[in-house]
Amino acid sequence: MEVSRLVAAASLLVAAASLLAAAYLAAKLSSALGELSELRRELGELEASRRQLLEKLKELEEALRAAQQPAVQAGSAWYPAVSGEVRAIAYILPSRASTPAWRERYGDRTYFYVYANLSEYAELIDEDFAAISKVYNTVIVVVPADDAARFRANLALLDSIARKRGLRILWAVFPKWKYGREEDYLAPGTPMNRLVLDVMRYLAGLNSTWKVAVWYGWSNRANADDVVSFYESLPGDLKPLYACWLDQPYAEVARGLAQKGVDFLVVTELYSEAAISAYSGLLKRQMVVTGYYGARSPEEWLSGISKKISLIRGVGRYLGIWIFYDINDGHGEEYAAYSPEWRAVPDPYKLEVKPAS
């Protein structure tokens, strides 16, 4: 009997020891798990710090590259992110023939190039292009996609005036709605697609043509896959000519294009300081189009535009100015970088005012 009690007591002691050992091990395991969780958190923080350091290193490398290559330098202005290779300004209506009539009659001021007899305006356009050539080497001519009888003759006349003044042209094709919805141009074989490709092919044959940028972006449709698919669907001879045009509300598409590593030019209209800072440094082949609103003198325009240009990020970005003249054209904006009354052209690269003639 006594032996049985001793055995039972021993068993209880063994069980208690086992429970204590299990509790100890559980405590150790819990502590180890806590330490592991803490290590994971610290590793996450280290990884975040590593990424931040890499970003800083990238910025420093870009700054170093910018310092080692020619930059746009002018007086007290220095824009290391801007390339002087392309100095562009947008152009729609002649400054001495600006009128809301084209917008009122056809829905958009760009239809001036479709329905006007441009030979009647040739001297006025030449006068503007002569002033433009004092500062810029590229004109951004904004046109719709169309096939009306006068359209191609008008484009050819613009080409000849540009060549006379030593200017090249970046054609900005805003497709509009000749044969269906504007976005239908993205789908191969549709009437709008054939129209846009026909216009691109005609422009490719003009001597002054540098690029043809095609508008992309709508409130219900804005994604990089669309743009890449359209580019890939282009005939081989048109691909080197193509550029994508993105207005500020659709600038996020540029981020998607950067992630896909596209090698065609992407034109981004960026007007607010926040947008310029956020989207100007995304792609290696990028043009930033910006402007200053409501200038009443060339000096005021220079002061306003220089602040915006100084915000451009990256290295070697092309700069496009919106717009040569847009007063009383029916669009309701006042981004004009020139006025006939000024008798001068403000130069955003050298921060000086040059005589227009």
Image (tube, grey):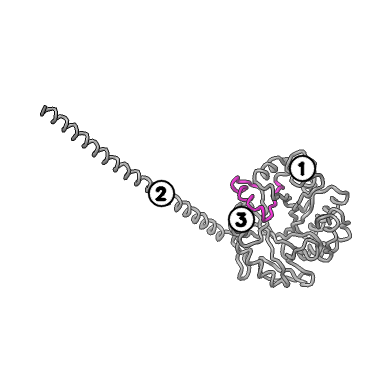
Kind of residue at badge 1: Asn
Q: What residue would you read off at disc 3?
A: 279
Magenta residues span 240-263
Which sits earlier in the primary sequence, circle 2 or circle 1?
Answer: 2
Residue 233: tell me if it is visible. Answer: yes
Q: Secondary structure at mark 3?
A: helix
Q: Position of residue 111 (x, y in %)?
A: 83, 55
Q: Nearer the viewer, residue 128 or 43?
A: 43
Left/right of residue 65 with respect to residue 233 in the rendered view: left
Label 2 near label 3: C-beta < 8 Å? no
Residue 259 belongs to magenta span? yes
- Res 41 label: 2
What is the three-letter code of the residue carrying label 2?
Arg
Residue 258 position, x and y percent, is 60, 48
Q: Position of residue 226 (x, y in %)?
A: 68, 44
Q: Mark 3, residues whose alpha carbon is within 10 Å: few (<14), some, or many (≥20)? A: many
Total marks shown come to 3
